Image (cartoon, helix red, strand yellow):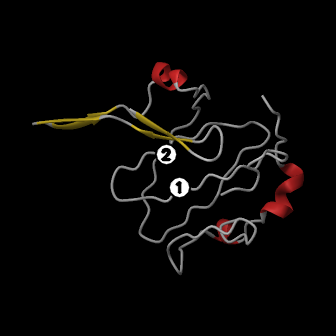
């Protein structure tokens, strides 16, 4: 597997090895020992599947106070998956609400399809009191 570090510590792009043969293809999307070897020890407690039409924006999600790891797998097509560091005090705080001017994320579509909940989401500044605090290692 190929691992790409991002500007936000702890956020990785993991490109799994894909094995093709006459029957089709196979890839491991998660394997605990291999992920631990690259520093990913977050327990994955939930597995979801969604299918989105072009232009759909599913929103930025976080869990507080109990953080959880996220593993995003794209089966077909393309996805723009955005990670934002919301740990107050972190050197990368605020780096990459769907249209929050403080985040200035360019989504690549003029009229995204949003759920009512995501369209009415709060800005980063409005959420700051509930966000986790950065604890340097």
Residue that appears at 77% across and 43% down: 64
Q: Sort mark 2 into few (<14), some (14-19) or many (20+) by Cα contacts within 10 Å.
A: few
The image quadrant where one finds the C terminus is top right
Query: For numbered disc 2, what is the local secondary structure?
Result: loop
Residue farthest to the left? 22
Residue 70: x %, y % from top left: 57, 41
**Residue at (50, 72) in percent of width and height:** 108
The answer to which of marks 2 and 1 sits earlier in the sequence is: 2
Front residue of this view, candidates 96 and 129? 96
User: Residue at point 83% right, 47% down?
Assistant: 88
Quarter placement of the N terminus: top left
Q: Are marks 2 and 1 in contact (CB under 8 Å)?
A: yes
Asked where in the image residue 127 lies, by quadrant, the reply is: bottom right
Mark 2 lies on residue: 72
Tell me if mark 1 has few (under 14), some (14-19) or many (20+) residues whose alpha carbon lies within 10 angstroms of its own. Answer: few
Q: Quadrant of residue 97?
A: bottom right
Using the image, determine if residue 21 lies above or below residue 37: below
Residue 57 drawn above or below residue 96: below
In the image, residue 17 sits, relative to residue 58, either above or below, namely: above
Distance, label 2 to label 1, CA atoms, is: 8 Å
Residue 33 vertical position relative to residue 76 in the rendered view, above or below: above
In the rendered image, which residue does mark 1 sit on? 81
Residue 60 lies, in percent from the top left, at: 64, 57
Camera-side residue: 2 or 111?
A: 2
Image point (44%, 62%), residue name: 52
Q: Is residue 54 left or right of residue 61?
A: left
Please, which residue is most extreme toward the right here? Answer: 129
Tell me if 9 is positioned left or right of 125 in this view.
left
């Amino acid at each position: 597997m190929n691992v790409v570090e991002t500007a936000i510590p702890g956020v990785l792009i993991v490109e799994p090895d894909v094995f093709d043969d006459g029957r089709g293809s196979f890839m491991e999307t998660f394997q605990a020992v291999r992920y631990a070897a690259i520093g990913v020890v977050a327990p994955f407690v939930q597995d979801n599947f969604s299918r989105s039409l072009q232009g759909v924006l599913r929103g930025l999600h976080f869990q507080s106070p109990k953080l959880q790891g996220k593993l995003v797998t794209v089966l077909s097509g393309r996805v723009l998956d955005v990670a934002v560091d919301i740990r107050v005090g972190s050197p990368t705080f605020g780096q990459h609400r769907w249209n929050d001017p403080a985040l200035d994320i360019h989504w690549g579509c003029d009229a995204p399809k949003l759920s009512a909940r995501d369209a009415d989401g709060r800005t980063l500044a409005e959420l700051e009191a509930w966000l986790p605090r950065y604890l340097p290692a």
